Image (cartoon, grey):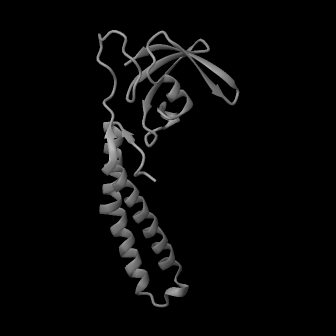
Amino acid sequence: MIKDKKIYLTKEGLADLKKECDELTKVRRPDILARLSQARSMGDLSENAEYVAAREELSFIDGRLDELQELLRVASIIHEGNKKGVAKISIKLGSKVTLHVGGKKEHFMVVGEWEADPAEKKISHESPLGKALLGKKVGEKIEVAAPAGKIRYTIADIN
């Protein structure tokens, strides 16, 4: 799944994934192993709901740990933003962008798909808007297809 694909993360995104990995490894997994051990000591495992639940949770945690470790192994760090004062800077991964749309200003950050969070205005470089923004410069206009129709954006600023 991850092996054939480039994974892009900001420094903050990488730190968040490392934090999650540490939490799972040092806190949650040992807690589940203790619950599993205690449930085993209760006797008949075929009718022990606590044992079954702990086993399922351990399986989920181990799967997530495998995924996180693979992500951390293959991730490429995005260097955020562009240098101020450089003429004709263009949008790339890590850029913070201000767009004009329908008379309003919208602020976005272009990130890799694993960090995308529309609620926090972090858009994936693989989303329709992200794809349309990459390589564009201040003043350029883009058009993105949306369920409600085409939306026109004007790039106001790039940080």
Write the residue at 43% across / 40% down: 115
Q: Residue at x 42, y 49 (%)?
A: 4
Name the image quarter holding residue 89.
top left
Q: Position of residue 104 (x, y in %)?
A: 57, 15
Q: Position of residue 113 (x, y in %)?
A: 46, 40
Q: Which residue shows up at 49% across the image and 32% down it?
A: 123
Q: Nearer the viewer, residue 136 or 35?
A: 136
- 105 shown above or below 29: above
In the picture provided, is 143 more to the left or to the right than 69? right
Residue 44 on image: x %, y %: 49, 90
In which quadrant is the C terminus drawn? top left
Number of dots carrying numbers: 0
What x and y, as percent, mark residue 5?
42, 45
**Closer to the camera in the image, 158 or 76:** 76
Q: Is residue 39 above or below residue 66?
A: below
Q: Quadrant of residue 10?
A: top left
Point out the residue furthest to the right here.
Answer: 148
Q: Where 36 sits versus 133, above or below?
A: below
